[in-house]
Structure formats: structure tokens, C-alpha cells
Image (tube, rainbow, N blue to C red):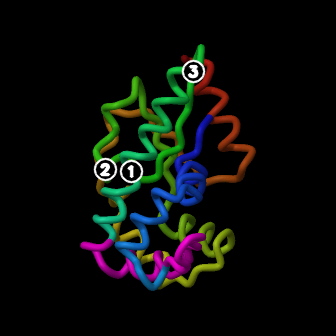
Amino acid sequence: TVSSDEMVTSLYQKNSVKRKLKKLFPDAVSGCFSLSIDRKKIAEKVFFDKALHKKLTDLVTPLVFNEIFKVAKKVNGVLFAEVPLLFECNYQNAFDGVVVIAREKSARIEAVKARSKLTEQEILARMENQIDYEKQDFSNFVVIENNGDVEKLTLAISEYLKTI
């Protein structure tokens, strides 16, 4: 299993990426030779500015998918990639299969609040840049509901894994 979020964190450590981010967000990337990224400042900007969000996504997404595909070439078996912006970036057809973990909006908001300490306004701003899971047609994909506890989700995933 690979995590796109972890890959982004790793990419943000590379000087080449830091320099590109400094051009996009001069007040969020400090330093001259040793650049330091303030991810919170970047998030504050991109989640309230769709054009800036697109620029960041256009910069980072291809790098993340290159990393995913590098890992995939090395794996002998099944690889699962956790990709939050899969549909938004139109990469769903780049994989042999897609599993959507669906959750009610209110439950997603509460989970993000607990995990990230973001305000509801910040979470909703981020969700504006995501597909609307309640309106999206996922009929071509496997959908696993995540509206119960961890035990129910684990059981549902285990049942799915038996089918592949």
C-alpha cells in the first residue's frame, strides 16, 4: 500500500520541489539555500483560491503519480494506492481497479476535525476542491461504505479482498 499524502510529504523535502513551491508561494517558503515550507500557509491560500489550488495540483500530482508508478513496477503482486484526488485529477483509468471508500459528509467532517484540528470552515473549503461523493456516479467502481466503526470497515475490506 502506498499513500499519496506520504509521497507529497516526501516530495516537499526535495530542493527541486521546494524551489517550484517558492515561486508559487513566496511567503510560504522561506530561506535562500535551505528552503523551509510552511504547509499551513500553503493550505490557507490554495483552499480559498481555486486558481492557485489548480497550479499546486498541476505541479504536485504528476510527481506523485510518477512515484506511484515507480513503486508499482517493483511490486510483484497487488498494490493499493491511496489517492485522495484520484477523480479530481482524472487518474481513475490509470489503475486496474478503483475502490472508493465512501462516508457520509458529516462523518468525514468530524473525522477531519478530530485528526487535523481544522475548523469546519477550513474543512468545507477543502471539500469544495473535491468531487461531491453524494452526487458522483461510482457505478463503475467498487464502493465500500465507511459509516460504521473500524471493525465494520475492516470486515468490509476483508470481504472485498477475498474477491481479488
Is 100 situated left or right of 157 in this image?
A: left
Q: Amino acid at mark 3?
A: Lys
Secondary structure found at label 2:
loop
Q: Amino acid at mark 1?
A: Thr
Query: Which residue shows up at 49% across the image and 60% down it?
Result: 104
Q: Which residues are magenta?
A: 29-52
Give coordinates of residue 35: x percent, y percent.
56, 71
CB-based contact (under 8 Å), mark 1 and mark 2 = yes
The residue indicated by pointer 2 is 89
Secondary structure found at label 3:
helix
| Front-lying residue, 77 or 28 | 28
Give coordinates of residue 147: x percent, y percent.
59, 54
Mark nearer the N terminus (3 vs 1): 1
Query: Which residue shows up at 43% across the image and 37% down it?
Result: 66
Q: 149 above or below 22?
A: above
CB-based contact (under 8 Å), mark 2 and mark 3 = no
- Residue 67 counted in the magenta span: no
Q: 158 above or below 113?
A: above
Give coordinates of residue 87: x percent, y percent.
33, 47
| Front-lying residue, 16 or 128 | 16
Q: Quadrant of residue 118?
A: bottom right
The residue indicated by pointer 1 is 61
The residue indicated by pointer 3 is 74
